[in-house]
Amino acid sequence: MGKTTEYEFGGPIGTTINMIVLPLVVVFLYLACPNGESSGFCLRGVDVFQLKHMPIPGLSQLFSLDAFAMCAGWFLFLVFLERILPYKVGQGVELSNGQRLKYRINGHLTFWVSLFVAEHFIDLSILYDKYLELAVAAISLSILLSVYLYLSSFKKGALLAKGGNTGCAPYDFWMGRELNPRVGDFDLKVFCELRPGLIGWMLLNLGMLQKQRQLNNGSVSTSMLLVNAFQGLYVWDALYNEEAVLTTMDVTTDGFGYMLCFGDLAWVPFTYSLPARYLVTHNAGLSDEILLAFALLGMLGFYVFRASNSQKDAFRRDPQSEEVKHLKYLKTERGTSLIVSGWWGLARKINYTGDWFFGLSWSLFTGFGSILTYFYPIYFAALLAHRAWRDDHACSLKYGADWKKFKEMVPYVFFPWLF
Ligand code: NDP
């Protein structure tokens, strides 16, 4: 594999800034909306000037050996389940060396087993009490794992990702040098993409629910139930459709470095669980009718997200299968075909649009008391816009003139007839 010559994410400076700022954002989101006695502080509305009263924690509130042991124990417990639970074998896409890697597909079973163990043997409300220490422990763990991944990528024979091999250490550390780092047949990237952070996020939410129940004499708000149900559905869906991750950009193209490692292990669980954490001590103040309207909007988003992703997945597996053989497509010089009807005829990234609306509903369930609980849809809009741009660039390189033709046939990116 030759050296990477094109930079993304603002090059060495942009990626270094990201590496420093993103963990601080995780801590900031806690401090701007803290737990326990200080929970009354939570940033109200959009008035950011209140932040000058934000409580600043001491080092002992940030770091604890207990929290680190809990995070490491959780990670190892899931490795154990991945190893011992029955599995079917999934195949990855063909790599640049002609190889197709095999994967243990047992994430869905792992989801139910870990949920059962956590619900029956652990008082999950501890996740609320130790939230900040756990977040810092997860960040530390992701940094340690990234250092290991970076160093081990120099071993002989490692297949490097196209994007993380510039020779500039901080940049490559962020992007990830090795495409599919493994220990034996244990695939670190696919494991981290779907298990510790995603299932951990769901347990954090359940911990918030238990805490609210403890504080409110056994009662739980409808908003809390909805946030748990909707985000739980999102996590369950990812694990139920585990094999679909094998064809995503993260797995097929990006190296496994700090960007994905930190994102999977720290960012996803500790920023996406903010709505549930907020609801422990805040009332959304929404009527049942309004909550129902938000739930319907979310379900519509989920339907578009799931139906479009499943349609593409089914088409990629077998274009002649019953469910997709009616679709129109553009046969490309590269050999694969691009769907130009059905969901994918409406807009080129219709799956992102559905995903975003589903995510918006999680924030809407918290009401309008603080801009902080809208962090996810704001950040996610930026992530999806950047991801769409990255994929467009990658596809124009992959498909050349065919991509141009495809874009003429499907002119809209996110919304049919709008843009
Ligand atoms: P896509 O599922 O959109 O995959 C892009 C690839 O699909 C392209 O490179 C191309 O690959 C293929 N493709 C694109 N258009 C067509 C078409 N018309 N017909 C056939 N194949 C096509 O992107 P992602 O992997 O980024 O996302 C997957 C899902 O994960 C999305 O729903 C996204 O919203 C979600 N996601 C969620 C995140 C979160 O934090 N919540 C983060 C990131 C993603 P090729 O032609 O080589 O097959």
Image (tube, grey):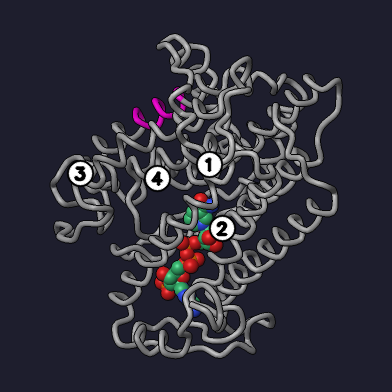
Whether residue 245 appears in this view of the structure is no
Residue 113, position as x, y percentages in the image:
70, 35
In which quadrant of the rendered image does the N terminus lie?
A: bottom left
Dot placed on the residue nearer the N-terminal end, 2 or 1? 1
Q: CA distance from mark 3 to mark 1?
A: 52 Å
Circle 3 sits on which residue? 156
- Seen in the picture, residue 245 relative to 345 is either above or below; the reply is above
Is disc 4 surrounded by few (<14), some (14 to 19) or many (20+) residues within 10 Å? many
Residue 243 circle label = 2
- Seen in the picture, residue 122 relative to 18 is either above or below; the reply is above
Q: CA distance from mark 2 to mark 3?
A: 29 Å
Circle 1 sits on which residue? 46
Check disc 1 and give the amino acid type: Val
Circle 4 sits on which residue? 260
Region in magenta: 136-144
Q: Is residue 409 left or right of residue 357?
A: left
Pair 4/1: label in front? 1
